[in-house]
Amino acid sequence: MDFLDIPTDASVIDLLYVTIVFIAVFGYVPQIFKLWKSKSDSMDISIATWLIWLYTWVVTLLYGMFELHDLKLCLVAIINLIGHVAIISLTLRNRNRFKKDKQITE
């Protein structure tokens, strides 16, 4: 009896792994749109946390490229990197814009 009777067929696991990209995109898109349209300074977004996650995906991409030579892992890492960079960039843009707007009104 296999552990919890989980199927070990590689094609099923491969299919599940590919879904990570779609789930990631559906996770990032609403946050990106919210930050894009935001009229606030986005101080409720933790840049430090997003930078930590960005670092983990950079290392994952490098590991997938140079150690595993795994295209699927690299694609997942690239999609996540794009999402993280977009969120960090938009958050910094909003903070900078809010800071400039505040200086203009003073």
Image: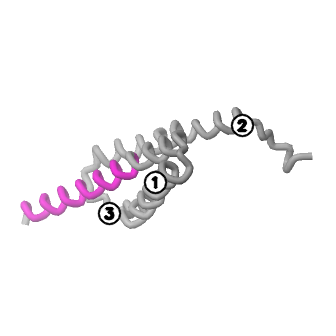
**Closer-to-camera residue (44/2):** 2
**N-term-proximal mark, 3 vs 2:** 2
Q: Residue at position x 76%, y 36% from top?
A: 9
Give x and y (percent) for residue 30: 41, 42
Tell me the kind of residue under disc 3.
Met
According to the picture, the residue beneath numbered tag 3 turns out to be 43
Give x and y (percent) for residue 104: 7, 61
According to the picture, the residue beneath numbered tag 1 turns out to be 62
**N-term-proximal mark, 2 vs 1:** 2
According to the picture, the residue beneath numbered tag 2 turns out to be 10
Is 69 positioned to the left or the right of 12 in the image? left
> Considering the numbered disc 3 on the image, is that residue within a helix, a strand or a loop?
loop
Is 98 positioned to the left or the right of 104 in the image? right
Tell me the kind of residue under disc 2.
Ala
Magenta residues?
83-105
Question: Quick check: is 94 in the magenta stretch?
Answer: yes
